[in-house]
Amino acid sequence: MSKYLFTGKYTATGVKGLIQEGGSSRHQAVKSAVESVGGRLESFHFAYGETDIFAIVDFPDSASAISLALLIGSTGVVSLSTVPLITVDEMDAAAKKSPSYRAPKG
């Protein structure tokens, strides 16, 4: 499973829906959506300021994460950003690799 950080910003319509349905309802809706594609919601938080929602989610594959991001984005009530999270071990493995690359001349 791979972890992803989702951040979201509600539109005015989304805020109205949140006020009407409440935070627990939105949390459950996100949890159910994540589980519907084989994922697990690790944490879900509301915030205020530039970002309204933070969620950390485990997914079995990238396609599952992308499918959820597309579904939520298609509603038009929240602008979503998705960030793949990298473990310490993955970063260590990447740092040990020696890729070959030639920068453009300029």
Image (spheres, rainbow, N blue to C red):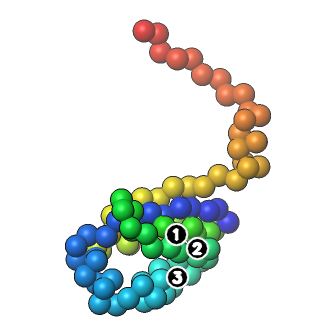
Sequence order check: which comes first, mark 2 or mark 1?
2
Residue marked by disc 2: 43
Asked where in the image residue 7 lies, by quadrant, the reply is bottom left
C-alpha distance separating marks 3 and 1: 10 Å
- Which residue is at a point 58% across and 73% down the rendered structure image? 43
Vertical side of 60 occupied by 24: above or below = below
Left or right side of 22 for 40: right
C-alpha distance separating marks 2 and 1: 5 Å
- Which residue is at a point 77% across and 49% down the rendered structure image? 89
Quarter of the picture holding the N terminus? bottom right
x and y percentages locating residue 17 in the rendered image: 28, 84
Crowding around mark 1 (Cα neighbors within 10 Å: few <14, some 14 to 19, many 20+) is some
Sequence order check: which comes first, mark 3 or mark 1?
3
- Front tag of 3 and 1: 1
Crowding around mark 2 (Cα neighbors within 10 Å: few <14, some 14 to 19, many 20+) is few
Specify whether residue 63 is in view.
no
x and y percentages locating residue 44 in the rendered image: 53, 74
- Which residue is at a point 76% across and 42% down the rendered structure image? 92
Disc 1 marks a residue whose amino acid type is: Ala
Q: Which mark is residue 31?
A: 3
Whether tag 2 and tag 1 are in contact, CB under 8 A, the answer is: yes
Secondary structure beneath label 1: strand
Sequence order check: which comes first, mark 3 or mark 2?
3
Q: Residue furthest left?
A: 12
Secondary structure beneath label 2: strand
x and y percentages locating residue 2 in the rendered image: 64, 62
